[in-house]
Amino acid sequence: DGGITQSPKYLFRKEGQNVTLSCEQNLNHDAMYWYRQDPGQGLRLIYYSQIVNDFQKGDIAEGYSVSREKKESFPLTVTSAQKNPTAFYLCASSILRTATNEKLFFGSGTQLSVL
Amino acid sequence: GQQLNQSPQSMFIQEGEDVSMNCTSSSIFNTWLWYKQDPGEGPVLLIALYKAGELTSNGRLTAQFGITRKDSFLNISASIPSDVGIYFCAGPYGGSQGNLIFGKGTKLSVKP
């Protein structure tokens, strides 16, 4: 079955620690995205990537880093510089954007909490 | 910047009732998307709208692209317990090659 797989489902971060959230897709989509969701809030874009080895900052990129070494993988690192990392993180993908192709397909999310 | 305002923020309804929610924007959108998020899961696309005035159905769900292109509506008929979740509207914001902006969601609770 084609889809987007995020792991782990739950992750705990200690003070000063970097943690990496995994996102893999087998949909052959060109573009991948990371969103952050806080309770009662919409989804806010952290980073996105349209092609391999290229990525762009979204609205709230500070304290996060990404890489796109393979088309199917887009890991997100939450660095120690992110002072309020507790949130639900969602990875998404879409086929290369055309005028009517903004549909995003989401993974099942990773809940990150601070110890 | 662009914002999407969804209302109501939450709804508590009886099973079998119809539901209406809407989403408004301060600027024009060329696409409206409606997603549903189950607790602890990622959002799933319900309906996509591409043309002003368009009315599209997906089972018991019907969504409309407002004539002004600044709003969209989602209706659910004869609600059932599995309709519980958060419903988000979304649209692509210009200048970022179509990245989506999301509303804050309408949380739906259904009493059996």
Image: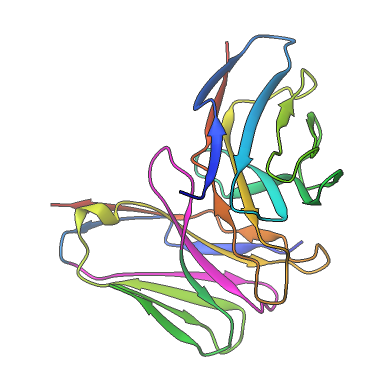
- Return the residue found at the far left: B112
The residue at the point 28 percent across, 57 percent down is: B83
In the foreground, A97 or B87: A97
The colour scheme applied to this rendered structure is rainbow
* B71 on left or right of B56: right
In the rendered image, residue A42 lying in the magenta stretch gets the answer no
What is the x, y in percent for residue A17? Answer: 72, 12
User: Relative to A65, is A28 above or below?
Assistant: below
The residue at the point 57 percent across, 88 percent down is: B52
What is the x, y in percent for residue A4? Answer: 55, 44
The residue at the point 37 percent across, 79 percent down is: B57
User: Relative to B5, is B75 above or below?
Assistant: below
The residue at the point 48 percent across, 51 percent down is: B43
* A32 on left or right of B97: left
Q: Quadrant of residue A65?
A: top right
User: Relative to A79, is A39 above or below?
Assistant: below
In the foreground, A62 or A4: A4
* B19 on left or right of A37: left
Residue range highlighted in magenta: B17-45
Location of the C terminus of chain A (image quadrant): top right
What is the x, y in percent for residue B67? Answer: 56, 89
In the foreground, A83 or B98: B98
In the rendered image, residue B32 lying in the magenta stretch gets the answer yes
Q: Quadrant of residue A70?
A: top right
User: Relative to A103, is A10 above or below?
Assistant: above
All told, the count of numbered labels is 0
